[in-house]
């Protein structure tokens, strides 16, 4: 178990993360499967797409279906019939963004479920126990994700609390054991807002505790891209080369390329799935808005270079029709394509790093991405008919 | 091209319909693909399910995407990338049920689109032209589907108008040619409401005109099942043995078995797709409502005897979770299963007919279907959370 750094190219890294459900080749993009499903795609399609590892959300799965059923079904893998690795967050981010938050104390966070108003408490120890029930291959510590912008005094106090919680998670992890026979890893989460000193304090303290990997949290929450990139570089400079780095919730293809250049190995983001469901698709040549009238009669695939089921089979004209008609198949096909493109991007980055040509390859990708972007253009007719999701 | 009757068992029939996109083994169930997609399933999945032929709706496809784009894309087959046969209705049923109907005349029907209020006219000649543009393997004549109950005087006059329209469709069919190089068939539609004399008049007149096959329309519109079965038998008794019979819009597994027994070869119905999206699944042991609390912790598949992707892979507990969480995957997996079960039922009926044991096989199916039905039971908690469609 654990991470092997295979090659570096500048700060960019190609590695291998070994888990209880097989290897993950990094850099890697992890599709988001919040409620035990990556929205609108089947598990067998995720394998076909090339998804090596998916993300589950502890907050959602704890509330529904709950840990009792998950334990009965052999954890999240058994419940959702997913054979490859799973990473779960700690639930903290969702508590702060979805639940009716009732209070943060030294002990943990009290909150009211967004589903039924029931009251709950997440402590560092509790989120480890829940993730033992989930059986995730990679577990995350409980943290507070500070909003942007934040006062430095608030960010500093929050940062120290998050570090104390990380220590308690580390201890709880040592005290407990996996439930399903496969090993689990625990990652720490670097916080510190947009304050370089706080980021350094967080990274150094977590490294001193010793985790199987390190996430960079609290970014992609509204700060400008250059700030995100600076904070990322501040963190990766201090994190040990022999452990994986995971930039949480990031981002666009451009964001991901910038972070790989700064030494990040793992990514998750709802953009490919959520944007897909809203008729925006990612191609090598930029984004396309399938509601745009210029696609109405276009027999071309979304991306002529893409080998996914959608691009092998269907035209832009057909996909646009499905979106305008409000058909579920639109969501399926756009999601398949977008996830394929995200997985291709990180896999191709890995090949470029292994070949020692990451910088040139990245510039070529960015040049192409600037080519065909129409995602910001308005719809042809402001037509929201058939809007599905 | 055309139909070969292979075997009869009582009035039940096993046959082979040859089309421009290959053979269809009858009895057959045709999934409904109203807008150029069978809702929530991919085209490759339809093939996997065993769908031999699907149905498209002329009214919907004429309004959106329209015949110009369909012609550019090589007809409905090219547009939706479907390689197997397609049957299209004439649009009449949808005009009468969906559009703002502005008037029926000898010439045809005038209506206002449910999409944008635009005005249109369907004539017998026009619907043949549209179905030439669609390139459907089996085209249907324009008819009026009389509501139930109806006055006999109204049904009689409507029946005569439908027969005159059928004659005009037949002539238009002869005058026009396929656009895409594959042959097209034209079916007549027997109407006559629930009046045996009118049904006989309709069947005999259509047979005299000579069509490639005969549909039985205007049933499953609210009449009791015994009336549906009686009318079906009245029609099939008069239709030529060497041509296929298609009972439009029918129905439950029990309805389909009763109609096969009375000599029907082809079926279409939205039940497996629509019910699937509403969490009701069809199994060999009857219907299951996946919102029912008794499935909450059940690790069993929907139907242990079923070989579909859903049943091979997922538990009732997982499917129930997906429905309660409002996840799109719920719709996909329930639809895959229900269509598999419908296609299995008709394929198994065919085997029983070829083996000469249809009556005994049918009784066994009905006995099993009475076993596990909980579709009429109320939800465990009247919970409509997460309702998706």
Image (cartoon, coloured by chain):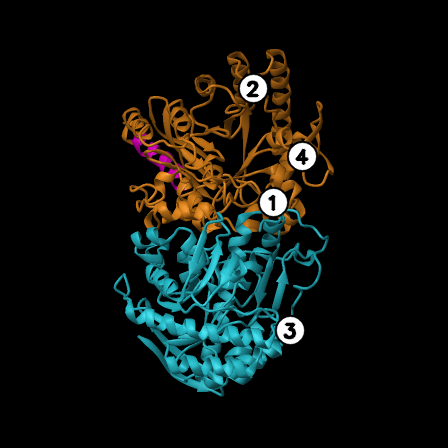
Chain colours: A orange, B cyan
Tell me how far mark 4 sits from mark 3, CA to CA. 47 Å
Q: Secondary structure at mark 4?
A: helix
Asked if badges 4 and 2 are on one and the same chain, I answer: yes
Tell me how far mark 1 sits from mark 3, CA to CA. 41 Å
Asked whether the residues under the numbered discs 3 and 2 touch, taking CB atoms below 8 Å apart as contact, a structural biologist would say no
The residue under the point 69% across, 37% down is A113
Residue toward you, B290 or B146: B146
Q: Which residue is under mark 4?
A: A126
Q: Nearer the viewer, mark 4 or mark 2?
A: 2
Q: Secondary structure at mark 2?
A: loop
Chain to which the residue tagged by mark 1 belongs: A
Looking at the rendering, the stretch of residues picked out in magenta corresponds to: A340-354
Tell me how far mark 4 sits from mark 1, CA to CA. 15 Å
Work out whether B76 lies above or below B166. Answer: above
Query: Left or right of B227: which side holds B131?
Result: left
Q: Is residue A203 magenta?
A: no
Numbered circle sitting on residue A148:
2
Dot 2, crowdedness within 10 Å: few (<14), some or many (≥20)? some
Numbered circle sitting on residue B279:
none
Work out whether B139 lies above or below B259. Answer: above
Dot 3, crowdedness within 10 Å: few (<14), some or many (≥20)? few
Dot 4, crowdedness within 10 Å: few (<14), some or many (≥20)? some
Asked if badges 4 and 3 are on one and the same chain, I answer: no
Numbered circle sitting on residue A179:
1
Query: Which quarter of the figure has residue B54?
Result: bottom left
Asked whether the residues under the numbered discs 2 and 1 touch, taking CB atoms below 8 Å apart as contact, a structural biologist would say no
């Amino acid at each position: 178990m654990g991470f092997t750094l295979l090659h570096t190219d500048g700060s960019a890294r190609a590695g291998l993360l070994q888990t209880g459900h097989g290897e993950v080749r990094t850099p890697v993009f992890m599709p988001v499967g919040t409620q035990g499903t990556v929205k609108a795609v089947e598990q067998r399609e995720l394998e076909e797409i090339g998804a090596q590892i998916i993300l589950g959300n502890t907050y959602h799965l704890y509330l529904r279906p709950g840990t009792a059923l998950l334990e009965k079904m052999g954890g999240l893998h058994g419940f959702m019939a997913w054979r490859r690795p799973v990473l779960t967050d700690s639930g903290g981010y969702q508590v702060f963004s979805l639940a009716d938050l009732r209070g943060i104390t030294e002990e943990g966070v009290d909150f009211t479920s967004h589903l039924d108003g029931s009251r709950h408490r997440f402590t560092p120890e509790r989120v480890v126990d829940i993730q033992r029930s989930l059986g995730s291959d990679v577990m995350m510590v409980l943290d507070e994700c500070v909003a942007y912008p934040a006062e430095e005094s608030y960010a500093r106090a929050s940062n120290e609390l998050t570090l104390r919680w990380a220590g308690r998670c580390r201890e709880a992890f040592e005290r407990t054991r996996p439930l399903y026979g496969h090993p689990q890893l625990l990652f720490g989460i670097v916080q510190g807002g947009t304050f370089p000193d706080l980021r350094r304090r967080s990274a150094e303290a977590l490294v001193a505790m010793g985790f199987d990997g390190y996430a960079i949290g609290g970014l992609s929450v509204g700060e400008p891209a250059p700030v995100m990139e600076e904070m990322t570089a501040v963190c990766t400079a201090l994190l040990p080369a022999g452990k994986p780095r995971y930039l949480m919730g990031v981002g666009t293809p451009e964001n991901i390329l910038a972070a790989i250049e700064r030494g990040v190995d793992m990514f998750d983001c709802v953009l490919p799935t959520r944007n897909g469901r809203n008729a925006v698709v990612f191609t090598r040549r930029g984004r396309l808005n399938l509601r745009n009238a210029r696609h109405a009669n276009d027999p071309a695939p979304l991306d002529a270079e893409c080998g996914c089921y959608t691009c092998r089979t269907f035209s832009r004209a057909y996909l646009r029709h499905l979106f305008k008609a409000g058909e579920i198949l639109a969501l399926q096909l756009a999601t398949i394509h977008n996830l394929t493109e995200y997985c291709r991007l990180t896999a191709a980055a890995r090949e470029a790093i292994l070949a020692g040509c990451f910088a040139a390859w990245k510039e070529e990708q960015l040049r192409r991405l600037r080519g065909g972007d129409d995602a910001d253009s308005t719809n042809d007719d402001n037509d929201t008919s058939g809007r599905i999701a």
